[in-house]
Every structure is written in C-alpha cells, then in structure tokens.
Image: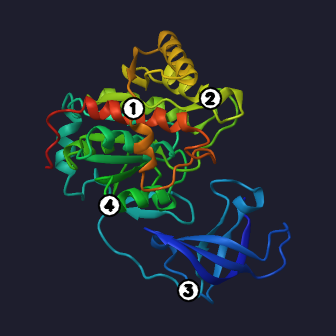
C-alpha cells in the first residue's frame, strides 16, 4: 500500500536531467511523525514541472519506512495543473498496469526506424561480434567501470544499459546524468520496466543488439538502476540478474565480463572481500563462459580477493576465467570521475577496493575490445 500525502511546493532544491528535487510542506500534522518540511522528487516527463505554491500529491512510503536510496517523497501529480497530453509513435508500455504507466517508442518495436536492423540481427549468429559486455551487481559500479575504460582507451564508445532490478526511472540517477554531461557515455538504453534512457528496449537481449548494431558501441555496461534490493538470503537480491546478463551476452556473441563486487568497508560478513552476490550471480546463475577480472595483488586485501575469485571460478557452474589486471593509475582515474563515488553509503576513501574492482573490469574490457565496432544501420 502507498502512503499518500498532500503538500505545498516551497522551493526548488536541485535539478538534473529529467528530474527536479523540491522542498515541500505537508498540508497537515503527519500521522507517521514526518517533519512538516520534506524533500520531494518530481519526474518531469511524468508529472510536468511543479512550481512554488503548487499543491502536489505525494507518495511518502519510502520516507515512512526510513529507506536509504529511495528515502524521499515522490510527486505523484500536480492536480491543479496537469501536464499536456503527449502524442507520438510507439506502443510499448512500461510500469505496466500501474496508475503511472507510460507509453514509449522502443528501439526494437515495429514503428522504430531501427526495427529492420534488429530483426535481421535476431537470426544472425554472433550479433555482438565479440563486443565486451561488462556486467555489475550495483549501479554504483558504473562510474568506476567507466573510469577504468577511459584509463585504458578514453575514445571508446560506451553505451549504458539499465535493467529494471532497482529504480525504474533512469532520471533518478544523478550519476548517469552527470556522466552524460561529461561525455563519458555515448548513449543509454533502459530495458524491461525501466524507462527514461535515450532509447527504450523491450528486453536486455534487444538492447545489447541495438547498442552494437544501431549505436556502434565498442563496449556496453549493464547494471540495474539505483536502489538494489537484498534480503540477506542466498537468492533474494536483485543483483542475481547479473548472471542472466552474462548469459545474454554470450547468447548474442558478446564477450561477457563480470565486475566482481568487493568490499572491505562493509561490516556484513557476506559482503566482506568477495560478496556473496558475485558468488551466486556469477558462480551459479551464469551458465555461459565469462571473464572475471581482478586486481593484480599488491596488498593483503587484493591477495584475498584474488584467492576468492579463483575459488569462485573453480566451483562455478559455467567456465569462468579469472584474469589478473594491473591496477596502476586507477586510483587517480577514480579521483577524476566527474560524479560522486558512493557504494552503500561509502566513498572512495572509505572503501577503495570496491571501486578498484569495478575499474579493473572496465580496464580489461577496453584492452580486449573488438577492433571492428558496429556500424549504425
């Protein structure tokens, strides 16, 4: 059940591509004890642009529960000033059968100018032409992976594919907005129920083919959106889909690369060193050949991760190949990232090995990229 509130918009706090954060005042004393002034996020494509003085309807469920990543109110509607109707091509519905479902033109649907190119690719073996596909459990790995790619080859065309395991609107991610503004991403695709990328796709498979054949990507990075879900059980976490993403890459003739999730700042034993998320997603869910890059050990923490990655590969369902990659220069590359680095609330100084591990995967992908990038149709 949603927790609803009515509020008045006080002022704009900050904005980025597709979203604006406001300070709003709740209309009445709150039954759950929320403060009278709270932060609220509006997705402009969904509700229009609220102005100071507007009455807004809010979903405050995350605030009431005290959540982290999603811990703010969401503007459901500006009831006294509705946005105009939007008419255009496309019939793919996302957030389906919810009160805020939207209709998009997907890159793979019949009305798309790229439909023929993707139809031809469906039956073609090796549609990705060995293109590296870097897969990670957490959205926070994205900037670090890009830092690793750029440290090796800054001119490569990188497309980000966001799956629907976390936030559905891409506009929620300030990281993606900043990386686009900085020119670190060539394009973005949202798949499944996720929406708001430069392009939409029905499935991860068609998104990967589109990245290669339509957008001429040299490398694709696949992660869920911000706000991963975990339950502390072996299978109950949204990052399990990382293994399925490696399967998709292999099915389409890509080179699957698993960015391992590592931490020495997380107090939870299941995430210390090599996370159980990587052990499960890559070791059990992945059924296809893939590479697991890790940092060539230069300290005790990296020695432990190297041992853990080799043990994971030895016990995995699929033929996984551990590869040692030099980490020299990656700390400096991470410090130059144009957006904030944060994973589970920890920054680069608090948990450096987490970001180094992701950057290592990016560096390896850049080093083995295909020599013949895809040609736009």
What label does residue 51 carry, if any?
3
Q: Earlier in the sequence, mark 2 or mark 4?
A: 4
Q: Which residue is mark 4?
A: 105
The quadrant of the image that shows the N terminus is bottom right
Q: Is residue 207 visible?
A: yes
| Callout 4: SS | loop
Mark 2 neighbour class, 10 Å CA radius: few under 14, some 14 to 19, many 20 or more: some
What's the residue at 31%, 27% (across, down)? 251
Q: Which residue is mark 2?
A: 235
Q: Is residue 104 left or right of residue 352?
A: left
Front label number (2 vs 4): 2
Nearest to viewer (mark 1 / mark 2):
1
Which residue position is annotated with label 1?
A: 328
- Residue beneath the point at 20% across and 44% down: 213
Give x and y (percent) for residue 77: 58, 76
**Callout in the foreground (3, 2):** 3
Q: Position of residue 118 (x, y in %)?
A: 22, 44
Residue 2 seen in render: no
Q: Nearer the viewer, residue 14 or 337?
A: 337
């Amino acid at each position: 059940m949603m927790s609803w509130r009515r509020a008045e918009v006080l002022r704009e706090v900050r904005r980025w591509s597709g979203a604006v954060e406001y300070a709003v005042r709740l209309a009445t004393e709150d039954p759950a004890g929320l403060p009278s002034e709270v932060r609220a996020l509006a997705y402009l494509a969904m509700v229009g642009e609220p102005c100071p003085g507007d009455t807004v309807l809010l979903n405050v469920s995350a605030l009431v529960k005290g959540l982290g990543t999603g811990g703010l109110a969401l503007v459901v509607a500006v009831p006294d000033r509705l946005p105009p109707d939007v008419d255009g091509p496309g019939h793919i519905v996302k957030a389906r059968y919810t009160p805020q479902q939207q209709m998009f033109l997907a890159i793979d649907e019949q009305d798309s100018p790229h439909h023929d190119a993707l139809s031809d690719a469906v039956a073609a073996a090796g549609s990705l032409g060995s293109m590296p596909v870097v897969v990670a459990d957490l959205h926070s790995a994205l900037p670090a992976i890009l830092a690793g790619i750029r440290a090796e080859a800054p001119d490569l065309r990188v497309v980000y594919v966001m799956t629907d395991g976390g936030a559905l609107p891409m506009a929620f991610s300030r990281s993606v907005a900043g990386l686009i503004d900085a020119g670190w991403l060539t394009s973005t695709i949202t798949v499944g129920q996720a929406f708001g990328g430069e392009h939409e796709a029905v499935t991860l498979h068609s998104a990967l083919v589109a990245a290669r054949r339509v957008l001429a990507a040299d490398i694709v990075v696949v992660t869920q959106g911000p706000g991963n879900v975990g339950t502390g059980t072996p299978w109950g976490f949204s990052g399990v889909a990382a293994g399925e993403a490696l399967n998709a890459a292999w099915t389409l003739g890509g080179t699957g690369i698993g960015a391992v999730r590592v931490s020495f700042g997380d107090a939870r034993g299941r995430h210390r060193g090599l996370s159980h998320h990587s052990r499960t997603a890559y070791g059990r869910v992945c059924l296809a050949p893939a590479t697991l890059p890790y940092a060539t050990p230069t300290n005790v923490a990296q020695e432990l991760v190297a041992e853990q990655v080799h043990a994971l590969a030895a016990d995995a369902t699929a033929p996984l190949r551990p590869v040692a990659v030099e980490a020299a220069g990656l700390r400096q590359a991470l410090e130059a990232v144009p957006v904030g680095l944060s994973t589970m609330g920890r920054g680069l100084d608090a948990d450096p090995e987490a970001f180094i591990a992701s950057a290592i995967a990016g560096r390896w992908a850049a080093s083995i990229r295909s020599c013949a990038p895809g040609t736009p149709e």
